[in-house]
Amino acid sequence: MALLHKLLNGTSFPKLCRMQDVARCFLLGPVFAGYPSRLYGSIKKTEAASGRSSPEVNTQGGLEKQTKGEVGLDLISPKEKIEIIFDKAIRTEIKDHFKLLAKELVDRWRGPEGCPLHEVLLENTRVMWQFRSDEDLDKWLVTSDRTIGGRSKAFLKMASNNQSALFHGILNTELPHDGETQRSGYCAMTSRIPRGAFERKKYYDWSNFNTLYLRVRGDGRPWMVNIKTDTDLVQKSQHLHSYFMFTRGGPYWQEVKIPFSKFFFSSKGRIQDNQQQLLTDQISSIGFTLADKVNGPFYLELDFIGVFHDPTHTEEFAYENSKKICGNL
């Protein structure tokens, strides 16, 4: 505590480059970790107003002028002080959230998903995710068994034509040497949970549709399609509804249609005897998992992911859920 007090007050380091400012930035930085771009913009504006160039420009200029065998770095003078405007960044962020909240209220008043009610009722097909730019890739998370010490690798990037996404990597089933892990070898990509104003969790309403529709191109491996419902309760955080997707391999695209009634219920990676129907009005995310226990490279190319209503499909639930059979489970 004494060292912290000295760092903040700068009593013990009079000749160093404003150590108290460095200490404040170090200690308060994580609190405002969500505003790096705005804070940096505030710093640049302050420097431009004062007529002083940024440390990056000074450093680059010093390195360009240096001679061979010398290293020159232009450091900020101890008398100069960088002004970081936290209040301005916070106020801007709050204003943005209130604007987003106002838009949500207007869309809610207009109708479901911000569309008039008659359009929603007549809607037959909806594209939920498509891959045309890097911004579309930011809506997804890539994970693998490296989080538990495994050696699989997974990457997500835009394809060469910038009209699809390519999920690729190497699957490795080798167990980590920790003496505890018994299974390894998986790679997955999962959509981010949608967020509203003030980082509120949102969900997708697919109650007007009965089939998942995908256009993919794979390498012949079997994939697991996972749909996750609203996860406000901790007990449901490991609940999934899943179904298999078999890719053909080769250069041709394939259109995959999976009725929601075919998705089976699982918890913590185990299929449950007491099956539960998928609640299509509380969808939070969708994902694709590869865990076929075959070592080697893999790839899955995705064009779009959507939902549609198939009038010929009348099945509500494909699995037995009788109280006489599952009542004691």
Image: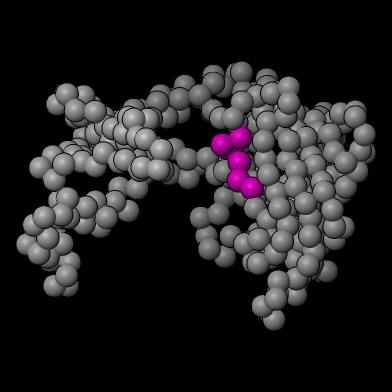
In the foreground, 188 or 97: 188
* Position of 88 relative to 263 (above/below): above
- On the rendered structure, is 62 left or right of 245? left
In the foreground, 18 or 155: 18
Q: Quadrant of residue 192?
A: top right
Q: How many marks?
A: 0
Residue at the image position 87 percent from the left and 31 percent from the top: 254
- On the rendered structure, is 158 left or right of 252? left
Task: Point out the image quarter for the C terminus.
Answer: bottom right
What stretch of residues is rendered in magenta? 137-142
Q: What percent of the width, then of the height, locates residue 326?
A: 78, 68
* Position of 118 relative to 326 (above/below): above
Is residue 60 something that shows in the picture?
Answer: no
* Position of 183 relative to 304 (above/below): below
Q: What percent of the width, then of the height, locates residue 223?
A: 82, 48
Q: Which residue is situated farthest in the bottom direction here?
A: 179
Q: What percent of the width, then of the height, locates residue 139?
A: 57, 37
Q: Quadrant of residue 324?
A: bottom right
In the foreground, 241 or 53: 53
Residue at the image position 59 percent from the left and 30 percent from the top: 134
Q: How is the image coloured?
A: one colour
Q: What percent of the width, then of the height, locates residue 118?
A: 60, 18
* Position of 244 relative to 184 (above/below): above
Residue at the image position 93 percent from the left and 39 percent from the top: 248
Residue at the image position 65 percent from the left and 67 percent from the top: 149
In the foreground, 97 or 102: 97
Q: In which quarter of the image is residue 73?
A: top left
Task: Point out the image quarter for the N terminus.
Answer: bottom left
Is residue 61 something that shows in the picture?
Answer: yes
- On the rendered structure, is 202 left or right of 296? left
- On the rendered structure, is 291 left or right of 2? right
